[in-house]
Image (tube, rainbow, N blue to C red):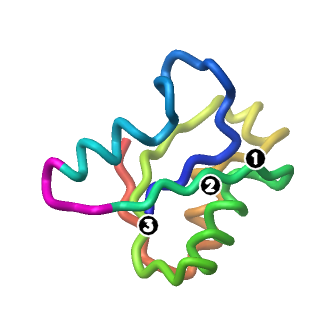
């Protein structure tokens, strides 16, 4: 599963259909995935953990991105949430 959380419409970095590019890349390597888009008012990290439980995932692969300490202190961060609360193995790359 490729999870897309709260995509912004018409954002150039996500392409015309968010998740389509990575799904195509994985398909070229023989990996079939389902692209799941969720809109949530909850923090992204919590939404990802909820999705992983809902889909009974046994591994999460994600990129790690850090914000300034001040911003993370005020707003938190998805990477931190996943590292602190994950109940499945996480393969993280930065």
Give the residue number, with chain letter if any, for mark 2.
Answer: 80
Query: Bounds of the magenta span?
Result: 28-32
Residue sitting at 15 percent across and 60 percent down? 30
Number of marks in the rendered image: 3
Q: Residue at x 47, y 78 (%)?
A: 57
Q: Check disc 1 and report its element: helix, strand or loop.
A: loop
Dominant secondary structure of the magenta stretch?
loop
**Residue under the image location 47 percent in, 24 percent down:** 15
The C terminus, quarter of image: top left
Q: Are marks 3 and 1 in contact (CB under 8 Å)?
A: no
Upstream in sequence: badge 3 or badge 2: 3
Q: Is residue 88 left or right of residue 72?
A: left
Q: Secondary structure at mark 3?
A: strand
Residue 7 got which mark? none
- Other residues around mark 1 within 10 Å, as few (<14) / some (14–19) / many (≥20): some
Is 54 a magenta residue? no
Compare marks 3 and 1 and give the one earlier in the sequence: 3
Q: Pointer 1: what residue?
A: 76
Q: 10 Å neighbourhood of mark 2: few (<14), some, or many (≥20)?
A: some
CB-based contact (under 8 Å), mark 1 and mark 2: yes
Residue 91 in the image, given as x and y percentages of width and height: 36, 63
Q: Position of residue 55 (x, y in %)?
A: 55, 78
Residue placed under numbered mark 3 in the picture: 60
Query: Is 24 rendered above or below residue 71?
Result: below
**How far is mark 1 from mark 2, CA to CA?**
7 Å
Report how far apart the C-alphas of labels 3 and 1 lie in the structure. 20 Å
């Amino acid at each position: 599963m490729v999870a897309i959380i709260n995509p912004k419409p018409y954002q150039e970095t996500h392409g015309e259909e968010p998740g389509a590019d990575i799904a195509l890349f994985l398909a070229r390597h023989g990996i079939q995935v389902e692209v799941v888009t969720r809109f949530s008012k909850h923090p992204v990290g919590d939404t990802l953990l909820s999705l992983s439980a809902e889909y009974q995932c046994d591994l999460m692969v994600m990129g790690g991105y850090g914000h300034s300490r001040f911003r993370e202190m005020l707003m938190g961060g998805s990477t931190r949430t996943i590292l602190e609360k994950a109940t499945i193995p996480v393969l993280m790359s930065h």
